[in-house]
Image (cartoon, grey):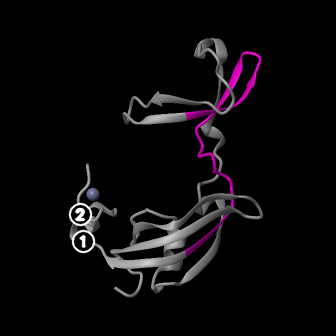
Amino acid sequence: MHTVQKNTVVTISYKIQEIGGEVLEESQEGFPYLHGGYDNIFPKAEEVLEGKTLGTKIEIDLAPADAYGERDLNLVRVESLSDLNIPGLQIGDMLEEDDEETGETIIWRVIAMKDDQVMLDHNHPLAGLGIRFSAEVLGIRAATAAEAEHGHVHDEHDSHGH
Ligand SMILES: [Zn+2]
């Protein structure tokens, strides 16, 4: 495989930076992902990587909606500290809640506290940020049938624990 295309496993080094701001995440040694619309990396970054060859460097700016999402005020709520009854609760703490419909765990971040009121936020911590995504293609190989079927990369033994 010489070009990035659907059902190739692409190894990239990458950097995610707030536009005009600090580096948020960086991987220099390389991160393998399955290419082809499996939602493993930002879709716009995948579009730019499509058809690229080994050693190609890319850099794109992503609007919040194309990165971690817009901040949604419906995902912010206020609770009473005495109702929550969590001793030592602080700004930045993460509270877990089980979603009764889906069974998934929902994370709420404490973003403000005043008197008896606690403001909880379920947005991604990086929601609302425009980011610059830069990457270099370090490796390209064909995906195995199992990888393509599962939509993600497996290890060298083509096995995994799920
Ligand atoms: Zn799998």
Q: Please identify the dominant SS of the magenta region.
A: strand
Examine the rendered structure and indicate whether residue 38 appears above or below residue 71.
below
Residue 140 painted magenta: no
Judging by the rendered image, the residue that carries numbered circle 1 is: 144
On screen, residue 114 versus residue 148, left or right, reads right
Examine the rendered structure and indicate whether residue 56 appears above or below residue 104.
below
* Amino acid type, residue under disc 1 in the picture: Thr
State the extent of the magenta-drawn residues as a range.
108-135
* Amino acid type, residue under disc 2 in the picture: Asp
On screen, residue 111 versus residue 122, left or right, reads right
Q: Quadrant of the N terminus?
A: bottom left
Q: Residue at x 46, y 86 (%)?
A: 53
Q: Residue at x 47, y 77 (%)?
A: 138
Confirm or deny contact between disc 2 and disc 1 (CB under 8 A). Answer: yes
Q: Residue at x 48, y 28 (%)?
A: 97
Question: Hey, which quadrant is residue 82 in on the image?
Answer: top right
Q: CA distance from mark 2 to mark 1?
A: 8 Å
Judging by the rendered image, the residue that carries numbered circle 2 is: 158
